[in-house]
Image (tube, rainbow, N blue to C red):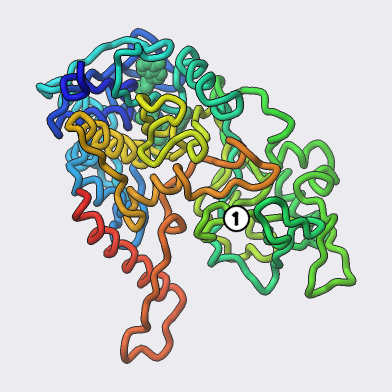
Amino acid sequence: MNSATQPIHVIGGGLAGSEAAWQAAQAGARVVLHEMRPVQKTDAHQTESFAELVCSNSFRSDDAEHNAVGLLHEEMRRCGSLILGMADEHKLPAGGALAVDRDGFAAAVTAALEAHPNIAIAREEIAGLPPAEWENVIVATGPLTSPALAEVIRGLTGEDSLAFFDAIAPIIHYDSIDRNIVWAQSRYDKPGPAGTGADYLNCPMDEAQYNGFVDALLAAPLHAFKDWEKVPYFDGCLPIEVMAERGRETLRFGPMKPVGLTNPRNPDVKPYAIVQLRQDNALGSLWNMVGFQTKMRYGVQTEIFRMIPGLEQAQFARLGGLHRNTYLNSPRVLGPDLKLKAMPRLRFAGQVTGVEGYVESAAMGLIAGRMAAAETRGERLSAPPVTTALGALVNHITGGHVEAEGYAGAKSFQPMNVNFGLFPGVEVKKPEGVKRWRGTEKAMAKRKAITSRALDDLKAWA
Ligand SMILES: Cc1cc2nc3c(=O)[nH]c(=O)nc-3n(C[C@H](O)[C@H](O)[C@H](O)COP(=O)(O)OP(=O)(O)OC[C@H]3O[C@@H](n4cnc5c(N)ncnc54)[C@H](O)[C@@H]3O)c2cc1C
């Protein structure tokens, strides 16, 4: 059979798989959508609907001018997204956010897929390698990919390339770090294979600051964990609050150790503890807090991390978290066309590619579905430009992330929401007649410039 007559097989009918199947079918391709529910359940899904929202019912901000996920919404609408279309039809009042009636939304997505003439639905688990005759496959099985399939994927990608357990450290926007306090230096000035000896940003603490910080960690409320999330953690990625519980000095001998570093502004005084930040993307706009995985509640994380000298004004691109998550080390194992380098007939989409969130997962489904459909016509579709939200996400998961020495593999590449740190920068000019341009106004102008450039640049691709 040639690829034009072959159907596209989409595995997983979640946010990504539903969107991928829809996009491919709308482009004229035949699609078989394989979903294991209700035959096999997951630990989080409650229904057999496609695109079930497992937790919150929010698609987050719908502000397409000043917010990166709002921009992603708009780009997806312009690409005829099923997920955004049905979200709009089933939206609930939620201020500036796009929140949906979860049952109405999922029922509408399910009905649309079932009614599409190009889509056949198979309620079955793909419990091993997809059959060899399936030449155009999209794997969109999500953070709770069934163990049988996960095992096969792990075999194809290498032992450490599929994380089953997600310890997420927060990520900070570079612009919000106080460069008058932090300094750039690698421990013992080691350049490593790709560094300069000044690759980390260091935030110094004195004894009183350290003790105050540990006290705050010990008092912090934690996320309530579901039973199935009570997984043992590896000693290598203990949450910081667990380390603090083990002893007041544990962090000072762990991720906050002050050795091999000298504060150039105060070289004679040894900091009592140091928090290190490591560059997270090639643009240098995002920095992660080294070893700072945590399961503290989101609100309190912001408060506590702003106690760290240099981070008083920190803006977080992503906060820390800890839950089971199956995702590929995509920068290593996927090509720019989202295909598995080790087996190119498999293309990946959704949270399993290392994006985080409903909208981002659906966005990857949108791209994978269009790419797979192009292939049935003998064409090759590139990802959208990196200046768009869709393109910035693809770029991050297939190349933008920087892997740091000693943190190779999935430990270094962590799931990411869309955010402005993933976009190439823009220059904005102070409007005529304005004497003093305040920081927030400038930031807003920058955001607007990024979003309007994105929508212009998307036109040709969409
Ligand atoms: C507990 C939990 C809470 C979350 N809360 C939020 C939240 O509040 N907001 C948010 O934005 N994101 C949240 N997420 C992340 C969320 O899972 C993703 O944003 C989104 O659902 C991912 O979409 P997806 O299509 O990649 O995966 P999913 O939506 O999970 O879809 C994957 C589908 O694949 C099916 N499947 C799995 N294995 C197989 C197989 N072998 N054969 C056939 N079918 C298979 C599953 O049944 C499922 O329907 C949460 C995740 C978890 C685990």
Q: Quadrant of residue 101?
A: top left
Q: Is residue 173 left or right of residue 208?
A: left
Mark 1 residue crowding within 10 angstroms, few (<14) / some (14–19) / many (20+): many
Compare residues 95 and 267 and report the one nearer the observer.
267
Q: Is residue 179 above or below residue 379?
A: below
Mark 1 vs ligand 1: CB under 8 Å? no
Quadrant where ligand 1 appears: top left
Q: Which amino acid type is marked by label 1?
A: Gln
Q: Position of residue 219 (x, y in %)?
A: 70, 44
Compare residues 3 and 360 and report the one nearer the observer.
3
Q: Which residue is rendered at x = 63% and y = 59% of the image? A: 306
**Residue 227 at least partly seen:** yes
Q: Position of residue 166 (x, y in %)?
A: 57, 33
Q: Position of residue 329 (x, y in %)?
A: 52, 35
Q: Is residue 436 left or right of residue 454?
A: right
**Residue 94 at least partly seen:** no
Compare residues 342 and 207 and report the one nearer the observer.
342
Q: Is residue 34 above or below residue 250?
A: above
Name, please, the residue furthest toward the top. Answer: 39
Pointer 1 residue: 279
Name, please, the residue furthest toward the right. Answer: 268
Name, please, the residue furthest toward the left. Answer: 117
Q: Which residue is rendered at x = 32% and y = 67% of the image? A: 448
Q: Which residue is rendered at x = 35% and y = 8% of the image? A: 39
Compare residues 288 and 348 and report the one nearer the observer.
348
Q: Is residue 116 above or below residue 335?
A: above
Q: Which quarter shows the N terminus?
A: top left
Q: Is residue 36 left or right of residue 417?
A: left
| Mark 1, secondary structure of its residue | strand
Q: Position of residue 383 (x, y in %)?
A: 31, 45
Q: Quadrant of residue 86?
A: top left
